[in-house]
Image (tube, helix red, strand yellow):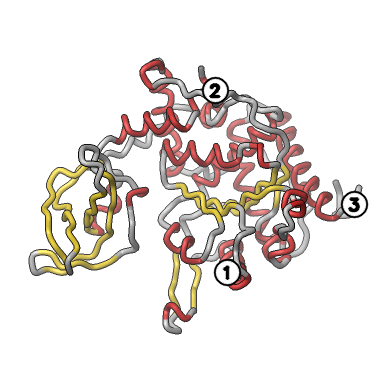
Amino acid sequence: MEGSIWHTDLLSEFNEELYHDVFTTDNIASNEISKRYQEQEFFGYLLERENHKTKVKERYFMPTDFLGSLPIRVTSKEKFSFKGEVLYFIRKCESCKIPSIKAMSFKELWDFFANYKHSEPDHHKLSRLVTLVGYIERINLRIVSEASFGKDGMVDILQLTNGGVVNLYNATLAKLKFALKNHLIIINELGGLKSAEIGSLQVYLTQAGAYKASYQNNSRSTHGTKETMNLMATSHLIFHNTPEYYVSKGQRYFEEMFTPAIMDRFPALLMKGYVQEDFTVSPRIEDVPIEIKNKIKHFISTLNYYKANPLKKAKYEVDRSFWGFKGKELQRALRGFKTLTKYLAEACESEEEFIRYCTILKDCRFDYLKLISGLETLNLGEY
């Protein structure tokens, strides 16, 4: 059953079972705002959720002090009106966080996560590693594949288990600004953006991809003032299909939309294969053995542990020349690969296994460069 437990319908039921009547970061429906309640000014966030009994959407105001306690269960609330809008003021709450406990090794965590059948197990497993590490630490990478590879599935799973992940299609600056509350932002399928939106995204990705601490937006919407967006705690992964997919649809592909500066900051990995697991029917939640449910809980708590306690040192390393980065790539792209392989080393049982996976990653990088160049070979240094 283990492969099919990652069906999103089943995970949605598990999420509901685990977080029933609980507010998470997914319920946040605003940036920080102010509201007047009982003659006092409070700063906080709007939360939205559907009432299970009435099926009507309800809006809550959560004071900023409670933000660090999410996910929360409300224990005391009061209905109030502000400028004609009816809200519930959250007076008291209790945190419902699954503890950050190392219930698995990192190898067990990696082996378990999204471990459904795939035609290219090594590529699929490395894409799962990229997703996990992107959740734990800040990295900037691209995953490029055919549409059937299963990129979105990994993100859906992580969102339903741990939360703090957002998958943005046609990501505009406004969407990104709101998404920065998450640990991991997936920028997905940018073909529908207008020229002006691409220009704004180019500026944002240039700064995010250079591992800047913040992004400063100076636009008409901010009346000429500089609006600062904190980037410190957020990874950015870009998902897109191979160039042939877009050419066949008469659309521009990634390299035609953005400047070489973005390629340097977001190196691409060409992943091959397709999902083979049968997800046509979801298992019923009542049929899932308790040991599997507990294993999912252990996965959640262990990923929380690594998020709170990132690895300090790599067990194995490769020389920086191994990846073939040159010039400015050494300043930015290499950082993401060093972070990624730090966790790869933690999961490998031998240096030989570590080198094997590093070689596959390098092949994925060069395979994409060859695909873009249109040449059989590409002279990018020692390979």
Q: What residue type is labelled 2?
A: Gly
The residue wearing badge 3 is 375
The residue under label 3 is which amino acid type?
Leu
Left/right of residue 355 with respect to residue 93 in the rendered view: right
Name the residue: 33% across, 35% down.
Answer: 98
Q: Tell whether label 2 touches label 3 (CB within 8 Å).
A: no
Crowdedness near tag 3: few (<14), some (14–19) or many (≥20) residues, C-alpha within 10 Å: few
Query: Based on the displayed image, in which of its 4 quarters is residue 354 positioned?
Result: top right
Element type where label 3 sits in the image = loop
1 or 2: tag closer to the N-terminus: 2
Q: How far apart, in angstroms, are the residues tagged by discs 1 and 3?
A: 32 Å
In the structure shown, which secondary structural element does the residue marked by tag 2 occupy? helix
Nearer-N-terminus badge (3/2): 2
Q: Nearer the viewer, residue 374 or 305?
A: 374
The answer to whether 273 appears left or right of 179 in the picture is right
- Judging depth in this view, the residue of 303 and 250 nearest the camera is 250
**Is 116 drawn above or below residue 288 in the view shown?**
below
Left or right: residue 3 versus residue 275 is left
The x, y position of residue 246, in whole percent, is 72, 53
Amino acid type at circle 1 is Glu
Position in image of residue 113 (x %, y %) = 53, 31
Q: Which of marks 1 and 3 is nearer the N terminus?
A: 1
Describe the element under mark 1 as helix, strand or loop. Answer: helix
At 29% from the left and 51% from the top, the residue drawn is: 48
Q: Residue furthest bottom?
A: 224
**Quarter occupied by residue 19:** top left
**Callout 2: few (<14), some (14-19), or many (20+) C-alpha neighbours within 10 Å?**
some
Residue assigned mark 2? 3
Which quadrant of the view contains residue 348?
A: top right
Task: Please say if 234 is above or below 99.
Answer: below
**Badge 1 is on which residue?**
197
In the figure, is residue 88 to the left or right of 20? left
